[in-house]
Image (tube, rainbow, N blue to C red):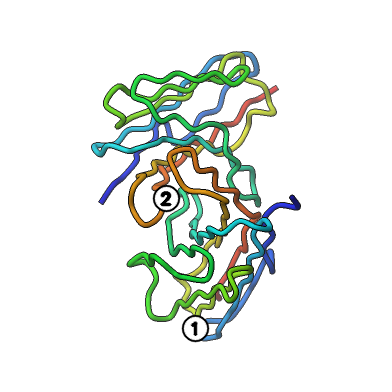
Amino acid sequence: DTGVSQDPRHKITKRGQNVTFRCDPISEHNRLYWYRQTLGQGPEFLTYFQNEAQLEKSRLLSDRFSAERPKGSFSTLEIQRTEQGDSAMYLCASSSAGGLLETQYFGPGTRLLVL
Amino acid sequence: TQLLEQSPQFLSIQEGENLTVYCNSSSVFSSLQWYRQEPGEGPVLLVTVVTGGEVKKLKRLTFQFGDARKDSSLHITAAQPGDTGLYLCAGGNYGGATNKLIFGTGTLLAVQP
């Protein structure tokens, strides 16, 4: 396994611009999560995919946010009309099975700064 | 809304000292996980505990899940500079549509040589 990868690692954008992040999970992991982490805080759940189906979205995910996982492989998270409050680390995690002992493997994150 | 509070928020100690980090909630969780996160990286899983009262040891780290499965503690013996990082507890609820994790507020540990 090469681990979960995320691209880009860093993104600086101006308020009002759209941004898109990509997550490549560990191959054959059918479960994929997106979390958001602001400075000094723990990650907060955003959304979850099982294969290509988006099964849960947090209330944190406003209408400006959209996530996809076509073909159940990589996933993208798009933020439209970015706001300064969107500045955070966006983390992706994947796992191969559910249950009590499920292990979510996290990627290195994409750090977004909205000016 | 389920919340996990960690204490202390910050901890700066000398190499060789012992420390305990606490993770508390008013909610019951099916499982409790501890992660360590280094700057600019994603969290890395240290341990998962699932049974009330369970104790797990990982070298110098000892993890305990409370009897009522609402709280947990992490004890580090003889801390080393390599233990420096952000320690996060996270609760999971098995049986729902997802195994999304509810993360605690984090404890930033700095071990001085």
Q: Quadrant of residue A75?
A: bottom right
Q: Residue at x 62, y 63 (%)?
A: A110
Q: Quadrant of residue B21?
A: top left
Q: Regarding mark 2 in the picture, which secondary structure is present there?
A: loop
Whether discs 1 and 2 lie on one chain: the answer is: no
**Residue A12 in the image: x percent, y percent?**
63, 73
**Residue A81 in the image: x percent, y percent?**
48, 85
Callout 1: chain: A
In the displayed structure, B9 sits above or below B60; it is below
In the displayed structure, B26 sits above or below A13; it is above
Q: Which residue is mark 1?
A: A80
Asked whether A73 or B84 is in front, the reply is A73
Q: Specify few, some or many for label 1: CA neighbours under 10 Å numbering under 14, 14-19, or 20 or more.
A: some
If the image is split into quadrants, where does the C terminus of chain B sit? Answer: top right
Q: Is residue B50 left or right of residue B44?
A: left
Asked whether A66 or A25 is in front, the reply is A25
Q: Regarding mark 1 in the picture, which secondary structure is present there?
A: loop
Q: Amino acid at mark 2?
A: Asn
Asked whether A2 or B43 is in front, the reply is A2
In the displayed structure, A95 sits above or below B13; it is below
Q: Residue at x 60, y 41 (%)?
A: B44
**Residue A34 in the image: x percent, y percent?**
51, 61
Q: Specify few, some or many for label 2: CA neighbours under 10 Å numbering under 14, 14-19, or 20 or more.
A: many
In the displayed structure, A87 sits above or below B31; it is below
Q: Which residue is mark 2?
A: B99
Q: Amino acid at mark 1?
A: Gln
Eye-nearest disc, 1 or 2: 2
